[in-house]
Image (cartoon, rainbow, N blue to C red):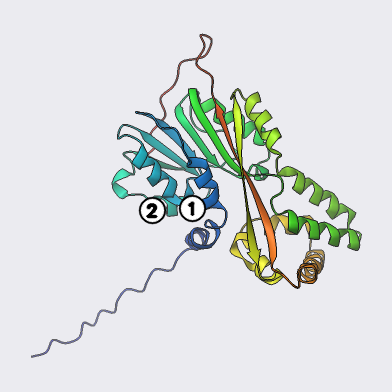
Amino acid sequence: MSQPPDPTPPAPARKMTDEERRGRLYEEQVFPLIGRRLVELLVEDVPVKPHSQVLQIRCGLGGTTTDLLRRLDHASRIIDLESAQGLLDRARANVAAEQIGRRVFFRLQSLSTRLPFGNHAFDLVLANVGLADLARPDEFLADLARVARPEAEVRVASPVRGTWVELLDVYRDVLVRLGREDALASLRGYAASFPEADAVIHQMEQAGLKPVTVRRDHWDLVFRSAREFFYAPVVEFGPLARWKQIAGRGPEVQDTFLAVKQAIDTYFSSRPFSVSIEAGLFIGKKPAESSDQPPSEPAPQDPG
C-alpha cells in the first residue's frame, strides 16, 4: 500500500540579507578585479618564522589566510580584521572550520579607530587597504608600526596616485566645460588623496619603520562603454558614491554624470574604455628592540 504524501511543505529557502548579498557580490565580481591582485602582491615571498603572531587587516576573503596557514607552523596564530560584516562572514566561510578559534581569529574592526592591541604584539603585520579612503593614513601607518614587534615586518598594499586617472581626466574636462569650479576643487582634492609612493615611504619611516621599500604594479580594467563602466560592481560599489559627492546634489549629479557618460562614449567611441589601477606594496621593518623600549606584549586571541 502506498504511503500518503507528507503534508508538511518544505521550509522556504532563507533569503540572503543585504549584507550577505553585498559580500557575495564583492567576492564574485569586485575582489577578482582589484582585491586579489593586491593581496597577491601583499603575501608574495612574505617571511614566516616559527611561533609567529600575525595580524592581517582586510583578509582577502580567506584566501590569504588559508595560504598563510600552510606556510606557518601549528604554533603560529593569525588575527584577521575586517571592517564590513558581510566580508568578514565570507572570509570566515572560506577558512577551514577546524582552524577558526584555534589558529585563526576573526574580528570586526573599523579602520578609522586605533587597533585594539598592545604595543609590540605581532611578528608580521599585513594590511590590504586603500590609503586614499582613510582620513589620516599617517596615523593608521603609525598604528601598524606600534603593534609590530621589534624586527617584525610591516607590509601595506594600496592603490596609489594614477588609479582611475582616465576617468578623472574626463571628469575634469566635463567640470571645466560646465563651469563647476566648486566641484573642480573637490575633484582635485580627491585625486590628491591617492598617495605618491614617496609620501607613503616617508610616513612609514616617520613611524619608525626603516628601511622602507616599495614594489609597484599596474593593470588596466577594460569596459566596452561608459554604461558598462558605471554599472560594473567594481565601480558601483566602489568609488562611484565618492565621485557623485564631488558632483554636488540633486539634479547637478544627474546632469554631470550624463555629461561624463557622453564624453566617455565620444572620446572612446572607436575603442574600449580602459582605466588604470596603480598599486604599491610598501615593506618596512621595525628596528631591533632597544633598552628604552617596553617589552613585547602577547597578541590577544579573540575568538570573535
Name the side, left or right, on which 48 lies relative to 176: left
Q: Residues within 10 Å of mark 2 (few under 14, many from 20)?
A: few
- Where, quadrant-wise, is the N terminus in this rendering? bottom left
Residue 118 spot, x, y in % from top left: 48, 25
Q: Nearer the viewer, residue 184 or 46?
A: 46
Name the residue carrying label 1: 87
Above-or-below relation of 164 to 106: below
Quadrant (top left, top right, bottom left, bottom right) of the C terminus: top left
Q: Tell me the kind of residue under disc 1.
A: Leu
- Foreground residue, 284 or 129? 284
Residue 74: image quadrant is top left
Q: Please tell me which residue is depicted at 34% across the width and 42% down the height of the picture.
A: 70
Q: Amino acid at mark 2?
A: Asn
The Cα–Cα distance between marks 1 and 2, rounded to whole angstroms, is 11 Å
**Residue at the spot of label 2:** 94
Q: Label 1, secondary structure: give it.
A: helix
Q: Hey, which quadrant is residue 262 in on the image?
A: bottom right
